[in-house]
Image: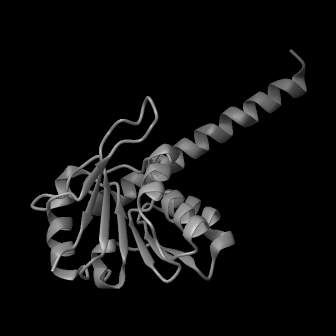
Amino acid sequence: MDISLFWIVFALLGGLVVIKALYVLGAVLALPTTGGALFCFTHYSKIETILDEINMKSNDVVFDLGCGDGRFIASAAKRYNVKGTGFEINFFAYFLARLRLFPLRGRVLVKRDSFWKADFGEADVIFCYLFPDIMEKVAGKTKKEMKEGALLISCNFPLPGWCAEKVLTADHPSQKDPIYIYRKKA
């Protein structure tokens, strides 16, 4: 093996180790707030299924709770020209979201802050892909704060005490988990 090829492979593998270490460190530092929920990607097939189903207007405000790398809010902003805010406390995911959302600055921002501090009454659409252990608390906050007619979309896990307006499934062989769409009624 050529010595330069060795160093290229070594550098690539070292880079992967560093990225994985940052991912783990981000999860560990966010652990007190997330209770163990990890940053994971929302598959594009789920995002496309959601955006095909709901219609947003350019003056709508979208909140993404635990936005991860920002792909949902970026996709919504690109398709519907909406304004939005992503909330992410994992610094690794926050950094990825900042990179993804940089071209959309001015319309979409990501806050390295807990969504529990946000006023849900400002949002027309709320998206979440959260663990079931906090969904009851999310249900209570949305019930108190969401404005009438606003939508809440939850991937994989239902909102306790709420009746879904629709339940969708992405058209992808590995993405058959339910997507719940709720609307705040009067």
Q: Is residue 1 left or right of residue 45?
A: right
Q: How is the image coloured?
A: one colour
Q: Is residue 126 left or right of residue 55?
A: left
Q: Is residue 99 left or right of residue 137?
A: right
Image x and y of residue 87, in percent: 42, 70
Where residue 173 sits, quadrant-wise, is top left
**125 or 18: nearer the eye?**
125
In which quadrant will I find the N terminus?
Answer: top right
Asked whether residue 36 is in view, the answer is: no
Image x and y of residue 75, in percent: 56, 61
Residue furthest toward the left?
161
Look at 52% across and 47% down and name the residue there. 44
Look at 63% across and 38% down and name the residue there. 16
Q: Is residue 63 above or below residue 54?
A: below
In which quadrant will I find the C terminus?
Answer: bottom left
Image x and y of residue 61, in percent: 44, 79
Look at 52% across and 61% down and name the residue there. 70
Look at 14% across and 71% down and name the residue there. 140
Image x and y of residue 43, in percent: 48, 44
**19 or 143: nearer the eye?**
143
Asked whether residue 186 is in view, the answer is: yes
Residue furthest toward the top?
1
Across the whole image, how many numbered discs are drawn on residues? Answer: 0
Where residue 159 sits, quadrant-wise, is bottom left
**160 or 98: nearer the eye?**
160
